[in-house]
Image: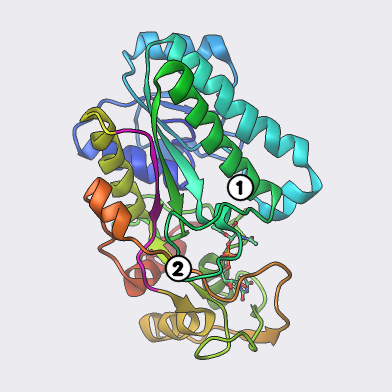
């Protein structure tokens, strides 16, 4: 599991172990946390280090890979394109080269709904045009292509999971998102509520949505972790290379997130209203039907579980 000490990676590593898989985590620990691996074998290093990946595959008898290790800040990607292309695209290519050289021919890839850009139609199906609007998003689209070529040239089968908005923490509050680096809505709501930052600024109240604020598909991180386990099972049963949406199919507005948080925690979320953020689509949410059909997976948690688990995690972690 590359990036298995990070947010979604650590939840997936745990879910894989709970499903009975022996795993090894490869993580540079640039952003990941040693604590998040919960005692799983950890190799500290880079996905682009051919010898390290090949040695790890040999030492741990690796049969398949779940690949999370990547940079994920949209804003930073627009300032440092080479850094993102090197790590997310060239890194994925180096990893695939070392894996195929080690006879590992199955990979689940951490992709993003941002490959669709601003969708013309919601819910978004996998046949929507690939039209990334940031370098970050394009690195995900490019890495999907790289994996497609490794299928054609080396027979490596991949499942690209195009996540919608990952959120929440493990239900037992053992692991969650490192909120020092995140800029996403739900951690910001929690920080504002807990007085760990100033008020939440709601970006835009004049969208063509029921309450005027932007709509997203928030998917619980433990649901996402389960999707990766299903994707591994799919590949081990001989499934061909594919890309599927990983979302709930339900959109929630910024105001709905705020109100649900206030209802669940019994505390007010200090907030202000500001202009739309440049480049933000008004509404995006998944059509999850294909994922359920192909992988036999669908989300089981809704927004309340996301907020409850985030609150528990953020109230107990420093
Ligand atoms: C962002 C990324 C996207 C990535 C996704 C999941 C951008 C432009 N897009 O999506 O590529 O796949 O995270 O990590 O960064 N909001 C506020 N106030 C805030 C923060 C957010 O009102 O302080 C609103 C946003 O305008 C948006 C919603 O909350 O409507 C969710 O925002 P965010 O969590 O940043 O995710 P996305 O922008 O959907």
The span picked out in magenta is 240-250
**How is the model colour-coded?**
rainbow
Q: Quadrant of ligand 1?
A: bottom right
Q: How many other residues sit within 10 Å of disc 2, few (<14), some (14-19) or many (≥20)?
A: many
The label on residue 43 is none
Q: What percent of the width, then of the height, locates residue 299?
A: 29, 60
Q: What percent of the width, then of the height, locates residue 83?
A: 73, 36
Question: What secondary structure is marked by label 1?
Answer: loop
Is residue 83 visible in the rendered image? The answer is yes
Is residue 53 visible in the rendered image? The answer is no
Q: Is mark 1 within 8 Å of ligand 1?
A: yes
According to the image, label 1 marks what residue? 72
Q: Residue at x 46, y 23 (%)?
A: 152
Nearest to N terminus: mark 2 or mark 1: 1
Q: Residue at x 50, y 58 (%)?
A: 128
In front of the other: 61 or 120: 120
Q: What percent of the width, then of the height, locates residue 120?
A: 56, 69
Q: Is mark 2 within 8 Å of ligand 1?
A: no
According to the image, label 2 marks what residue? 285
Q: Check if residue 245 falls in the magenta segment.
A: yes
Q: Dividing the picture into quarters, in which one does residue 288 lie?
A: bottom left
Q: Is residue 246 left or right of residue 318?
A: left
Q: What percent of the width, then of the height, locates residue 33?
A: 50, 39
- Kindly check if marks 2 and 1 are in contact, taking CB atoms under 8 A apart as contact: no
Q: How many other residues sit within 10 Å of disc 1, few (<14), some (14-19) or many (≥20)?
A: some
Q: CA distance from mark 2 to mark 1?
A: 20 Å
In the rendered view, would you say 274 is above or below 169?
below
């Amino acid at each position: 599991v590359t990036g298995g000490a990070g947010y979604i990676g650590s939840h997936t590593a745990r879910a894989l172990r709970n499903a009975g898989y022996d795993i090894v985590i490869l993580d540079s620990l640039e952003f990941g946390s040693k604590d998040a691996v919960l005692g799983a074998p950890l190799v500290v290093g880079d996905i682009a280090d051919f010898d390290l990946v090949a040695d790890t595959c040999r030492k741990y008898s690796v049969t398949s890979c779940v690949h999370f290790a990547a940079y994920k800040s949209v804003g930073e990607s627009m300032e440092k394109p080479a850094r993102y292309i090197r790590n997310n695209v060239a890194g994925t290519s180096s990893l695939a080269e070392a894996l195929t050289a080690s006879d590992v021919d199955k990979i689940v890839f951490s992709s993003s709904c941002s490959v669709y850009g601003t969708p013309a139609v919601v819910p978004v199906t996998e046949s929507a045009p690939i039209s990334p609007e940031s370098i970050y998003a394009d690195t995900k689209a490019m890495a999907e292509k790289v994996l497609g070529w490794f299928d054609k040239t080396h027979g490596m089968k991949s499942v690209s999971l195009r996540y919608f908005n990952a959120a929440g923490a493990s239900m037992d509050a053992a692991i969650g998102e490192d909120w020092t680096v995140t800029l996403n809505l739900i951690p910001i709501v929690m920080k504002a509520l807990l007085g760990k930052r100033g008020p939440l600024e709601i970006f835009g109240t004049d969208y063509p949505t029921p309450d005027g604020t932007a709509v997203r598909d928030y998917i619980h991180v433990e649901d996402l972790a389960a999707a990766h386990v299903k994707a591994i099972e799919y590949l081990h049963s001989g499934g061909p290379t594919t890309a599927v949406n990983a979302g709930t199919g339900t959109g929630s507005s910024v105001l709905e997130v705020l109100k649900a948080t206030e209802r669940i925690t019994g505390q007010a979320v200090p907030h202000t209203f500001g202009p739309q953020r440049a480049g933000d689509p008004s509404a995006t949410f998944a059509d999850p039907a294909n994922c359920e059909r192909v992988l036999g997976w669908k989300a089981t948690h809704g927004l309340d579980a996301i907020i409850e688990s985030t609150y528990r995690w953020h109230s107990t972690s420093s």
